[in-house]
Image (spheres, rainbow, N blue to C red):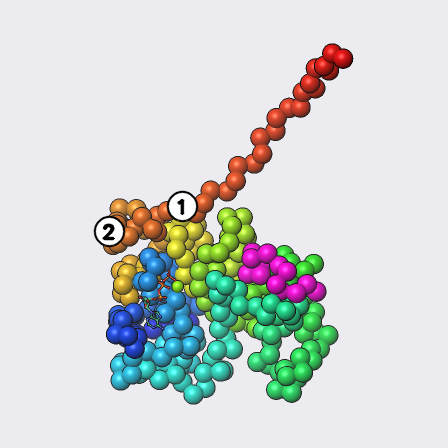
Amino acid sequence: MNTLLRIRHLDKHFANGRHALRDINIDVARGDMVALIGASGSGKSTLLRHIAGLVAADGGSQSLVEIDGCCVQKGGRIHRDIRKVRSQVGFVFQQFNLVARLPVLVNVLVGSLHRMPWWRSLARVFTAQERAQALDALARVGIADCHAQRASTLSGGQQQRAAIARTLVQGAKVVLADEPIASLDPESSRKVMEILARINREDGCTVIVSLHQVDVAMKYCPRVVALNQGRVVFDGPSSALTPALLHELYGVQAEELLRPVAPEPAPPVAVPWTAQPASAV
Ligand SMILES: Nc1ncnc2c1ncn2[C@@H]1O[C@H](COP(=O)(O)OP(=O)(O)OP(=O)(O)O)[C@@H](O)[C@H]1O
Ligand SMILES: [Mg+2]
């Protein structure tokens, strides 16, 4: 396996005593698309935040997170060169995390800030090439025509697509998407998942996406890692994840994962127009 992400013995207790991650060991190959599923509170966001080096695991532990051979954190300490590793990691959040008052194009250009000298990033001076690259990324996610709008004026689905365009401009090797479709309607959800699958397929970008819905995970991700109360309870092909197995792994909580996404609205039924008989005057 050409391993891109290596996680070993990841344990996390929060200050309130909550044991959120329990001895997580996962390898993800370069170019994989992996769904992280689990009921609310199972540890999906916490795990993604550890992978990105936003949170440190328990101090004094044997924990390790490596991306492409570079250390993100070890033994509960974030690596001192974390900025370099983080530039390889695109993070897509449920709530989009765009700067509402800035134009969409500038939000996307923020993805290239790590490559510029500090004075240029402060002054937000972007070259024509950088702008062209950002426009290209917006075109790939299908919202190039929105580039001049303030981010706050986009729909939720469009904002999420802009957030993905930002990771494209960043040139991320791995995209971590934390419930990217949780706030979206079915059609926007489908578009966002298809874009993630496309950047995985076309750019070879490794994608790890946390999802509530097993049906979406199975449709887009060949591999599923299932968490329950901070522990990995299943790691394998999504095709092996039957409702019976989910019930075995989660008990009554399986219902939360098996609940289908709200059905797409039925297309309007074409009712033949019939002329009303002219009322007798
Ligand atoms: N900063 C924190 N301090 C204390 N406890 C926390 C903190 N962050 C998360 N937790 C706890 O850790 C557990 C895992 O939380 P996490 O947010 O990772 O779950 P999740 O699987 O992402 O849930 P959801 O599907 O609702 O987003 C939960 O019990 C949560 O309350
Ligand atoms: Mg979460």
Q: Contact, CB < 8 Å: mark 2 with mark 1?
A: no
Element at label 1 = loop
Residue type at mark 1: give it: Pro
Question: Is the CB atom of the residue marked by disc 2 within 8 angstroms of ligand 1's nearest atom?
Answer: no
Q: Which residues are magenta?
A: 147-160
In the image, 279: left or right of 180? right
The answer to which of marks 2 and 1 sits earlier in the sequence is: 2
| Horizontal arrangement in the rendering, residue 245 relative to residue 179 (left or right) | left
Query: Is 164 one of the magenta-colored residues?
Result: no
Q: Residue at x 49, y 82 (%)?
A: 84
Q: Quadrant of the N terminus?
A: bottom left
Task: Indicate whether residue 157 is drawn in magenta.
Answer: yes
User: Where is mark 2, residue-wise?
Assistant: 251
Per the rendering, the mark at residue 212 is: none
> Could you say which quadrant of the image residue 61 lies in?
bottom left
Q: Nearer the viewer, residue 200 or 110?
A: 110
Q: What is the CA distance from the residue labelled 2 to the residue labelled 1?
A: 17 Å
